[in-house]
Image (cartoon, helix red, strand yellow):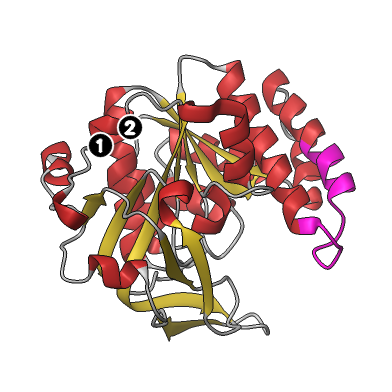
Amino acid sequence: MLLAWLALQPAFAAEAMDPSELDHCRIIGIGEMTHGGAAEVAARSALTRVIAARSPVHLLLEAGVAEGQIAEEARRTGRSREAAWALGYWTWRSEELVDALDELDVIDLRGIDVQTPGATEQRLTQTTDPGDLAALTWALQANRTLGMPTDRGYGRRRDAFMAQAVSAFVDADPERRAVVWAHNGHVGRKRGRLGGHLDRTYGDDYCVVGVVVGEGEATVMTTDGRLVTVPIPDAPGRSLVDAFAGQPAGLYAVPRGRWSIPQVGVFLTGADYTRIRADKAFDAIYYLPETGPTHPMAPPE
């Protein structure tokens, strides 16, 4: 039923995009336009379920390596709320992700980020699994090289390490494909970013689904740590939002040429617009006419 729903959505310029066209991909990056859109979480979950129904997958999140291990232990035993909370960052601690994890029962959940040395060191004292220990040791060494967020080149180093983490999971378990959830700016093919590294390593075996939202609201964090709701910004000029205006939610072929795409960052710092060559950055677009904000979850009891 879900596969049929996704496959039958009309496409931009009458070019349908069936999820089966991703079957050859060993790694599939699924982006997001915001870090706090409820419809984006639901869309990613729906597409991931379609992919996982065809073959077993690692679900790799833009979350810490240690946090991912703890979250998978909870998810595996049916504790989705504890799993979402264990991921550590507000972008994952939402009621929408809890619902998604309840539905994603045929995955192996992992984190690929290396920004949390404290959690990594603590996890090293809690696990005896050889694979987990090796991943944690690598993550701790990577963090020492990563530096501080204000350091020059921090973002590119972080993306390079995330790409290494993805490769480690994929290469160690060739029977599983990988689905990567990260921002459009990370998974898209761009030199020096996560998607650029994966494209260079895996070529046509790496596929990217960009997510575009027409309008609505998203959750963001203020610089003083409060979670607030903000409107999705309008994109100027020739935008992907305009390209898909009037279409229902679904998976679409990518229009050729350069388009602007609005982005809502983690923090409330104003609208950000990126002009990209969409057909180079992405293999498909998941268009959502509207989204509401994610709902922050309370700590599990």
Q: Residue at x 58, y 82 (%)?
A: 268
Image spot of residue 91 (x, y percent): 52, 63
Q: Is residue 236 above or below residue 203?
A: below
Q: Of the residues shown, which amino acid type is indicated by label 1?
A: Pro
Image spot of residue 291 (x, y percent): 30, 71
Task: From the viewer's perspective, tell me whether residue 66 is left or right of residue 140.
Answer: left
Q: Residue at x 46, y 47 (%)?
A: 280
- Can see residue 217? yes
Q: Is residue 179 above or below residue 277?
A: above
- Can see residue 291? no
Which label is found at residue 19? 1
Image spot of residue 223 (x, y percent): 67, 83
Q: Is residue 34 above or below residue 232?
A: above
Residues 232 and 138: in front is: 232
Residue 123 on the magenta span: no
Residues 186 and 170: in front is: 186
Which label is found at residue 22? 2
> Given contact means CB atoms under 8 Å apart, are the residues at marks 1 and 2 in contact?
yes
Determine whether the residue tagged by mark 2 lies in a helix, strand or loop.
helix
Q: Residue at x 60, y 76 (%)?
A: 267
Image spot of residue 266 (x, y percent): 58, 71
Residue 152 on the magenta span: yes
Residue 207 placement: quadrant:
top left
Please report the bounds of the magenta region as a residue range.
Answer: 139-154
Q: Of the residues shown, which amino acid type is indicated by label 2?
A: Leu
Q: Is residue 186 above or below residue 74?
A: below
Q: Residue at x 55, y 57 (%)?
A: 185
Q: Tell how many labels.
A: 2
Task: From the viewer's perspective, tell me whether residue 221 is left or right of residue 27.
Answer: right
